[in-house]
Amino acid sequence: MEKSIIGRKETVRLPDWEIDKITAKVDTGAYNCTIHASAVKEIQEQGQNLLEFILLAPAAPGYTGKTIHASKYKVKKVKNSFGQMEKRYLVLTTLSLGARTFSAAFTLSDRSKMKHAVLLGRKILKGRFLVDVEKTFLAGAPIIKEKQT
């Protein structure tokens, strides 16, 4: 598939989490995607390990306040923007960017002091998109389609 050109900021949709429209910063220095999350904790429910979290801050567009449960998750050690190692949870979800919809891995992080609650890392960009850092919102509104690879 041909690579699409996107800008340094894009509107994305995260349908599994009922986030229909949120601005994401494209960050080619980050490996994985990241999203702001709070109240992140591992729990057991009916003998199953689950990760429980709330996405976005209450003032953020797209905030629902809903508690989300993920049964498939990993614990990763990542270097934060200050160069320090920290433990983060990694979860899979569906991401729509422009006309493309695909599976993406997101780390959950406290981004309350950051301008953008969502970062798109190079893992999902590779082979799909080229970034024009002088422009923004080139992909257009996210369209839900069947999963692509």
Image (cartoon, rainbow, N blue to C red):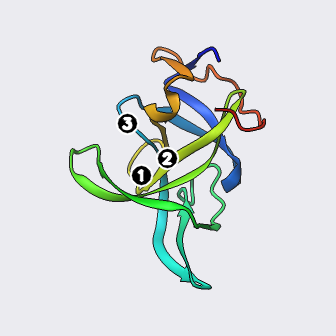
Give the residue number, with chain letter if any, for mark 3.
30
Three-letter residue code for mark 1:
Arg
Where is mark 1, residue-wise?
111
Label disc, if present, on residue 134 of the rendered structure: none
Q: Quadrant of residue 104?
A: top right
User: Under tag 3, what secondary structure?
Assistant: loop
* Residue for point 66% across, 61% down: 64
In depth, the one of 72 and 16 nearer the eye is 72
31, above or below 62, in the image: above
Nearer the camera: disc 3 or disc 1: 3
Q: Earlier in the sequence, mark 3 or mark 1?
A: 3
Question: Under tag 1, what secondary structure?
Answer: loop
* Residue nearest the observer in this picture, 118 or 122: 122
Q: Residue at x 53, y 22 (%)?
A: 127
What's the amino acid at mark 2? Answer: Ala
Q: Is residue 80 above or below residue 47?
A: above
Q: CA distance from mark 3 to mark 1?
A: 14 Å
Q: Are marks 2 and 1 in contact (CB under 8 Å)?
A: yes
Count residues near mark 2 (Cα–Cα under 10 Å), then give few for <14, some for 14-19, many for 20+: many
Q: Is residue 83 left or right of residue 40?
A: left
